């Protein structure tokens, strides 16, 4: 009698992430902008040298310029992180859909329908009951098809932007659900089928 491998993979969890955080531009610190102005005016008041006034005026311009550049580069980096996350998410979605479909096929092969069992009995094939007594599904009989959970669950890493988390949850919804898979009963545990 041909042996049959265990077809349903052990339970597991697929973790997706990290989800990028929302971009929060840093605010222009007022004290850091005003303090050099005040210091420059005090120095000018004591020394009466005009170049202190020039340096005093340059200080806030440098602060504003660096703040603008930081915001621009921060937004660009954020766009890149979001694009990378969405690309990774599409890859996860494709991989999980494939995993779900392979599991469905494996479950269908592991629990043939009644017509296939009758054919095997009529032809007296050696795979009529390809389950040894030690198999975890020994005595299991398919009674129909129905929905079931996949052997894996899907989780998002904690944290990140709420809108991106919602988007990811929408795209991943249903990938851990199987449709039209065998519903089985174990014959030694029921009194009637």
Image: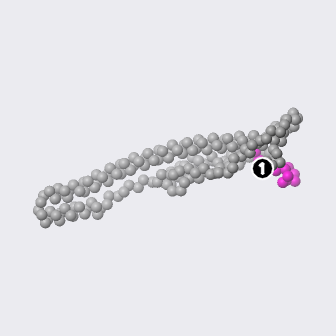
> Closer to the camera, 128 or 163?
128
Give how far across and how far down residue 85 sits, in percent. 50, 46
Residue 63 appears left or right of 52: right
**Which residue is painted at 87% across and 51% down in the image?**
192
The range drawn in magenta is 181-193
Give how far across and how far down residue 128 sits, in percent. 84, 39
Residue 78 appears left or right of 184: left
**Which residue is painted at 74% across and 45% down in the image?**
6
The residue indicated by pointer 1 is 136
**Which residue is painted at 58% across and 51% down in the image?**
15
In the figure, 29 relative to 173: above or below? below
Residue 103 appears left or right of 143: left
Q: Is residue 98 magenta?
A: no
Q: Quadrant of the N terminus?
A: top right
Q: Residue furthest left?
A: 48
**Which residue is painted at 71% across and 49% down in the image?**
148
Give how far across and how far down residue 116 sits, in percent. 82, 37
> Badge 1: how crowded within 10 Å, few (<14), some, or many (20+)?
few
Residue 132 appears left or right of 77: right
Residue 36 visible within the image:
yes
Residue 149 visible within the image:
no
Give how far across and how far down residue 49 sits, in percent. 12, 60
Q: Residue furthest top?
A: 123
Question: Hey, which quadrant is residue 48 in on the image?
Answer: bottom left
Tell me the element at label 1: loop
> Closer to the camera, 131 or 144?
131
């Amino acid at each position: 009698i041909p042996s049959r491998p265990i077809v349903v993979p052990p339970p597991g969890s697929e973790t997706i992430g990290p989800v990028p955080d929302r971009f929060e531009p840093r605010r222009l610190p007022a004290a850091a902008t005003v303090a050099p102005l005040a210091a420059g005016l005090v120095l000018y008041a004591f020394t009466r040298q005009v170049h202190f006034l020039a340096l005093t005026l340059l200080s806030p311009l440098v602060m504003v310029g660096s703040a603008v550049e930081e915001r621009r580069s921060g937004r660009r980096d954020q766009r890149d992180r979001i694009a990378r996350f969405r690309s990774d998410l599409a890859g996860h979605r494709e991989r999980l859909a494939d995993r779900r479909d392979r599991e469905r096929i494996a479950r269908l092969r592991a629990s043939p329908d009644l017509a296939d069992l009758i054919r095997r009995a009529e032809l007296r094939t050696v795979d009529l009951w390809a389950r040894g007594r030690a198999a975890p599904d020994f005595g299991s009989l398919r009674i129909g098809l129905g929905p079931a959970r996949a052997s894996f669950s899907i989780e998002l890493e904690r944290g990140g932007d709420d809108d991106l988390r919602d988007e990811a949850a929408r795209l991943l919804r249903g990938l851990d659900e199987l449709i039209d898979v065998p519903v089985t009963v174990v014959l030694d545990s029921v009194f009637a089928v």
